[in-house]
Amino acid sequence: MKEIIATEKGPKAIGPYSQAVKANGFIFTAGQVPFDPATGQLIEGDVAWQTARVLENLKAIVEAAGSSLERAVKATVYLKDMNDFAAMNEVYARYFPKEPPARSTVEAARLPRDVRVEIDLIVLA
């Protein structure tokens, strides 16, 4: 059985996907980009600002599903430019200060709306 997760505190899905799906004790989030859920607009700024917005969006979604970032077990980070890794990593570390999830980070040729970062998570429910 699966449960679709949706919250006004996270960006609305802009296509045929869910913000997250809870199934078999896990929460699988959609990849999040730096949309401001209050305005529905992308935020301006460098990769650090965009990473913080993405992680705030993910935090809201997993909390709406009844969990927290502390229960994340896997993250995938997509960067427009791998030269942004250090700046992204500095912000990311503030959201996962201890026992961080396993993570893959890849450079993508192009991300939705030409953002600098997209992140998705797998979290224990």
Image: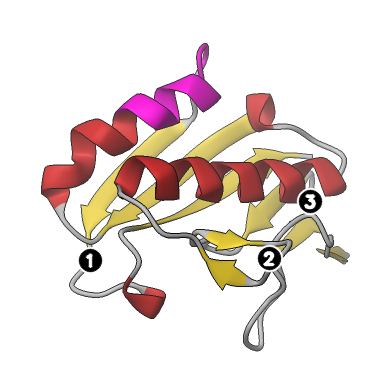
Q: Secondary structure at mark 3?
A: loop
Outermost residue on the top side: it is 98
Q: Nearer the viewer, residue 22 or 46?
A: 46
The magenta stretch is 90-99
Q: Is residue 98 magenta?
A: yes
Task: Please indicate, yes or no, whether residue 65 appears anywhere in the rendered image.
Answer: no
Q: Which residue is mark 1?
A: 108
Residue 24 tag number: 3
Q: Residues within 10 Å of mark 2 (few under 14, many from 20)?
A: many
Q: Residues within 10 Å of mark 3 (few under 14, many from 20)?
A: few
Residues at marks 3 and 2, CA–CA distance in whole angstroms = 24 Å
Q: Nearer the viewer, residue 18 or 44?
A: 44
**Does 95 sit above or below residue 98?**
below
Pick whichever of labels 3 and 1 is earlier in the sequence: 3
Pick whichever of labels 2 and 1 is earlier in the sequence: 2
Q: Which residue is mark 2?
A: 11
Q: Marks 1 and 2: in contact by CB < 8 Å?
A: no
Outermost residue on the bottom side: it is 16
Q: Disc 1 marks which amino acid? A: Ala
The x, y position of residue 45, in whole percent, is 36, 53
Q: Is residue 89 magenta?
A: no
